[in-house]
Structure formats: structure tokens, C-alpha cells
Amino acid sequence: MRASATADRFAPLWADLRAAAEDAVRDGPPPLRFREFAAFRERGDRLGYERPYFARRRQLAALALTVLVDERPEQATALNDLVWAVCDEHTWALPAHLAPDDGPAAHTRCVDLFAAETAHALAEVTRLLSPALHPEVTARAHAEIRRRVVEPMLEPRSQPWESWRHNWSAVCGGAVGMTALALLDDERERAALLARATRAQEVFLSGFGADGACTEGVGYWSYGFGYFVYFAETLRDHTGQDLLTGAHGDHVRRIAEFPAAAWLGGGHFANFADSPEEPALPAGLLCRLRQRRVARSLPPLTTPPRLEDDPCYRWAPLTRTLCWATDEAFAGPAGHPATTRGGGPAAATSGPTTDGAVVPDDACGDPPERTTETGREGGGRGDAGEVPGRATGETTGAPGPVVTEAGTWFLPAAQWITDRRPVLGVPVAFAAKGGHNDEPHNHNDLGHFLLHVGGESLLADLGSPEYTRDYFGPGRYRVLHASSEGHSVPLLDGTGQLPGAERHAVVLHHEQRRDGVRLTLDLTSAYDHPALLALHRDLDWRHTEDGGRLLLTDTVEVAGDCAVTETFVSRHRVRTGTDPTEPAHWRGRHGRVGLRVPPGRSWTVDDDEVRTVEHDGSPGVARRLHLTTTLPPGIHDLPVEFTVVVDRAGTPR
């Protein structure tokens, strides 16, 4: 890690670390007060306590790394004070993760995500920096790690997360396992914790379908799968056991390639569920997957890493990025510098430009991967044996992610479909989903879709709101972000879809073509309306020379009168007009999406803006367009067409 301090690729990150360390020396640890601790139990508020909690983890990462490299005595003093203060904390778990009936003793021994992460960070910090830490500080840190995490994990009682088939089992198990490897000398204790940590990783992997899709979204993929990789590589270094290429190797590869399937271009991803559209994927994680030849297809790194990429300032992804990422990883196509995160034209990647879903061939210092007959890595022939660009129905063989030459992916277990390609120098992408309404971090969003142009989703997913007690309780679907009213799905007499695994989509047809994709879903079971007999949604997406066209047709069969509202959601202002055949459009920096409705049906057109609270607590706004028509009994086709037009150079906006 010391060598990273002089590497150009890490210059912005090291500037952040040194600035944060100076702040920590000046300010000391922020207080963790009871009033904020109790606020979650009393009002459901999380951020008041979590902000200073994670500010302390920011100080820990910054001070530890700068003391390791710069060896300044005032920073070492501040690090000793900070580790002592972390040891003083009532609990390393977040209030949101404490059982409401537990008392103080149970709080201290609660092994949640952040208690496990804190134990891992302190275990490695005290090992790396023992000369700079006072022996009493080190001894106390080890005692607290043992009391809060090691001893609960040595008890026969299972932790709840050990059976959870999502990010918790990977993160908690992985952090506990890495803590054992860094701290424990007793072979029996170490073996016991490693056995539980390894079993937790197997539980985590079992939560993925055969296509490797993470229905929690790419942000949670980088969290859960990231900790799986961090633990797997630490375990391999110590024992030689290889979780990446062992019995689950094919499954791990499919999971590793999931971000390529969700990639929209630039730093943007299909952000279904509680995932951000622009997650900062850890550079070390992507490079390690490339170096180990675990993934054949990965999205490119579009921006150098920064300290604020992770608002929780986790030790594992930060330090593994400093250890694993190489110069080539931060070069854009043909060695050009990586761009900053955000919108704008997307450059082509190395090799053929038909897809771009690969990192440059020499990224992470690794020789090129195997190429296919199409000349691009991981493409050409999907795992189910499709011919590039050929229209297909249901997949045959193993239901892995299906990749075609045009940059399309279909994930049959998750029922996600994506298509992306450059048009006039900017990325144009379409994504849609089926699935069911009891997925991890679920939204009631079956049939929802995105249209993305040049770094902006003009028809969008709202992502995650501020996390509160109510959002993870009975009030979840009263929050716009998770409700059907916050997604581009039909409403029946003003009511949306219901939660539950039984509320699921059925894929009636999917097709992948050289010029686009098509997905037809049966959404009937998602609704509970007395007049509804059937509701099918057909999404037919085709690229054009100047953008693309989406023909969306909802076929609704009702036994009685029913008002159907087609809602379309964006963060961009919807512009309505007087032309009944094109009632609305959305404009971005590099293009527009226009909505057209065929003549012959009467629609009421309305739009609104809803104030929201975003994941970080900041204010936001969701903008919705509503088309409403009343249907008599019978079968009705409700077609609408979206036309994507990319601005040509010099096009007036």
C-alpha cells in the first residue's frame, strides 16, 4: 500500500486521505450522542446517528493510511485517540440493526454489517500499524474485537444473517473471516470462524439465480460480492483455498459479469431496486476479477477512485483498491485518461466498438482474455448458445446471461433485459425488468423500464430514498421510490401492484436482435383488481440511425369498467404540448425522448412533480406523466411509442 502513495492513478485519492487526516487531527472524533442513538427507536431517523458514526470510520481510514505512509507523529497521536474512542462506543452496530427488545449488553455483542466491518478494520489497522499504536491501545482494540465479534461468533447460536441469501451473509461473514485471519492465533478458534465465514459465503452465492443477476442492483453487487471477493482472496493468501474458481466457479463468473449486463454506458447502470444509477464500483474489485480471469466482461472504470466514493468509508474496498488496481485500469480507451463520472459522450472501448462492455484489453496488467469469433471478449456467443444478433425465443441449455454482438443482455432468472450501443458518439440504452415483488430491497415495479441517452436516464428509476425505520417496515410502499406510483407501470383505478413473491411476472417472449430487443411479460398476478382478467406488457425496442424507438403495448382484459393510467417517471421536466399525437417529451443534454400515441383512443394527459427525500437525506423531485383512459369490458390494446433522438453536432436545443 505504501507504493500507492506515489502512483499517479491514486493522486486524487491520496489528496483526499491527507486532507481527511488533517481534519481528524484538528477536530478529533465527532461525538456519538444518546439523543441521536435513540432517534431511530423514537422517530425512525437513522442519519442523525449514522453521519458521525461514519465520520469516525472516515477518520480511521484516513489516519491509518497516512500514518502508514507519512509517519507523522501528530497523526499517530490522533489515530491512537480515535481507536480508543471507537473502543468506547456503546455498540459497533447501527441502531437500525438492533433488536428493539434487546438491552445494552446485547447491543454491544450485536454482529451486524458495521460491527463486523469495524472489527475487520481494527484488526488489520492494529496489525499494520503496531509500531505507531500504543501497546495499551492495541491491546484494548483486540479485547473489544474479541468481546464484540469473536466471542459471539464462537458461540453455537447462529447469527440471523448466516441464513440470509443476500449481501448481509457475504459482508458479515467475509468481515468476520478476515478478522479471524488478521487477529486470531488460536488455530481452533480461527478454524471455527473461518468455517462459519465460508458457509456464509455459500449461502450468499445461493441467493443468485443461474444467470448471476443481483436483483438488489449493481450498488449492492459491489457491496456483497465485493466482500465475497475480499474474503476469498484473503483466505487464498493464508490457506490456498480458492473460493473464486472452486466448486462454484461457473456461478461466481456469472455473478462477476452482472455489472456488464446492467451497464448503460459511462458510469451509469440500470438501477432497479434500491441501487444508485452511478455506483462507484471499487477499482480494486474490478481489477482483481480481471487479474484472476474470473470475469470475461466488465464495465470500464470511468473515473479515478476518491475517498467519498463510499459514504461508509469501508476499510476493505479502500485498501484492496490501493493494493490491486494498476495504472492501466485508470486509462480509458487506447490509454487515454479516464473521464470524470457523469454524463456526456461515451468513448468506445478497446477492440471492436459494437459493444464496449469490456475493460481495455491490457487493464490491470493482464494479457487479453480469450476472444470469440466476433472479436470481442465474452461476447459473440452467450452462455445458452445463441448466435450473435440472431432473434431468439426462450433460452436453451444453462440459463446464463445471454450476450449478443449488439451489446444486449437477457438475464432469464431475474427477467432483466438491457440493450446499449453508441449513437452519434453517445450511449443510448434501454432496460426493463420483470421478476417478482418480494426481491431484496424490493420495489413494486414489474414491467418497469428505462430509456438512457448520453449519461442521463430520461425515463428513469428513482433509486433509493432515505433509509428510515418505516421504509423497512409497514410503510415501505407508501414511499414513492418503492411504490408502483414511482415507476413506469400501469395503475388500475389509481391502484398499483402489490408486494409479495406471488406477485410475479411471467416471460411470455423475449427476443434479441441486431437492432434491439423485445420483452413480453404477463403482469396479471401483480395486481388485485376485481375487474382485471389479464394484463400483458410488450416492450419492443429498436435502435435507429439517430437514436431508437420503443413501442410499448399494454394489453388489458377487464370484466368491468376500469380506468387505466399509464405513468411514466423521470427526474427531468416533462414538456407537454397541444399535439394529441405527441403529448409530451423529455429533453436531456444530448438528446430527447418524445412520446407519441396513435389516434383512435381518448387519453387524459396530466403531469405532476413530487418532492422526495433521497438516500443521503437531500431533497429531490420526481416528475411524472400520466395518460388515463377508461376501458369498458373486453380486451384492449394500449400502444404508445417513445422516440429517442440524439442531438447531432450543432443541433439547437
Image: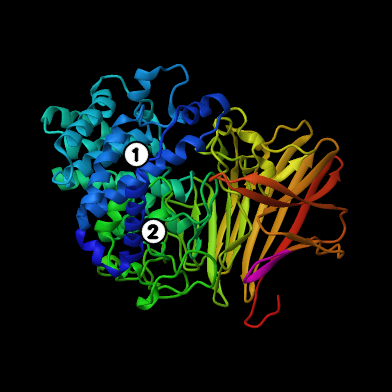
- Depth check, front residue: 394 or 65: 65
Indicate the secondary structure of the residue bearing disc 1: helix
Whether residue 57 appears in this view of the structure is yes
Quarter of the image holding residue 125? top left
Which residue in the structure is indicated by mark 2?
306
Q: Position of residue 549 (x, y in %)?
A: 67, 66
Is residue 226 something one can see in this rendering? no
As drawn, the label of residue 170 is 1
Residue range (magenta): 586-594
Query: Could you tell whether 338 is left or right of 645 in the image?
Result: left
User: How many marks do you count on the picture?
Assistant: 2
The structure residue drawn at horizontal position 42% and vertical position 47%, both measured from the top left corner, is 221
- Given residues 423 and 587, the one toward you in this image is 587
Height in image: 630 above or below 293? above
Looking at this view, is 29 or 409 the one in front?
Answer: 29
SS of the residue under disc 2: loop
* Contact check, label 2 and label 1, Cβ < 8 Å: no
Label 2: how many Cα within 10 Å (few below 14, some 14–19, many 20+): some
Render colour scheme: rainbow
